[in-house]
Amino acid sequence: MEKLLEITLLYDFYGELLTPNQKNIYELYYQNDLSLGEISKNLGISRQGVYDTLKRSEKLLYEYEQRLRLLERFQAKKILAKKILSCTESIEKYLGLETNHDKNCLNDLNTIKKLVYKILDQE
């Protein structure tokens, strides 16, 4: 996974565990795309201080993931949900609409799909 994407996802999961100062510097750098120099000037701290805070914040985010594995589990569940959708779509193709039994199966498949879409929309 690309580092920027990975650190952004980690921040989405664990950002609230950072201090207000760490969150502010992270957001200025990664979300507002300010340089270390711009952030240091805006906050009245050294460029090295900004750099150290960013590195410390990144390290903390990775440590939280190592311990809690929330992002890993989230991504695994997302893959499983997509596989379920794929299976339901395949089954729909195999079923015809000739009997009530088939109609009931299709209704159940549609219900499963709706539930999986709800899970995926909660990302």
Image (cartoon, rainbow, N blue to C red):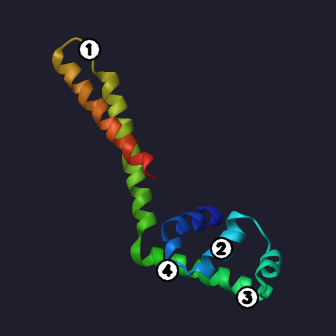
In front of the other: 94 or 19:
19
Name the kind of residue labelled 4 in the image. Answer: Glu
Q: Which of the two labelled residues, at mark 1 and mark 2, occupies the earlier sequence position?
A: 2
**Disc 3 to disc 1, how far (Cα)?**
67 Å
Give the residue pinned by disc 2. Answer: 26
Q: Which mark is residue 7?
A: none
Give the residue pinned by disc 4. Answer: 63
| Front of the two marks 2 and 4 | 2
Q: Which of the two labelled residues, at mark 2 and mark 4, occupies the earlier sequence position?
A: 2
Apparent side of residue 53 relative to residue 100 in the rendered image (left or right): right
Residue at screen point 22% across, 11% down: 98
Give the residue pinned by disc 3. Answer: 49
Q: Is residue 103 above or below residue 8?
A: above
Name the kind of residue labelled 3 in the image. Answer: Gly
For label 2, the crowd category at 10 Å Cα-Cα, with few meaning under 14, some 14 to 19 and many 20 or more, is many
Residue 10 picture location, percent across and down: 53, 68
Residue 59 picture location, percent across and down: 57, 81
Quadrant showing the N terminus: bottom right
**Tags 3 and 2 in contact by the CB under 8 Å rule?**
no
Apparent side of residue 6 relative to residue 71 in the rendered image (left or right): right
**Disc 2 to disc 4, how far (Cα)?**
16 Å
Residue 5 picture location, percent across and down: 61, 61
For label 3, the crowd category at 10 Å Cα-Cα, with few meaning under 14, some 14 to 19 and many 20 or more, is some
Q: Which of the two labelled residues, at mark 3 and mark 4, occupies the earlier sequence position?
A: 3
Residue at screen point 37% across, 38% down: 85
Q: Which mark is residue 97?
A: 1
Residue at screen point 30% across, 29% down: 91
| Front of the two marks 3 and 4 | 3
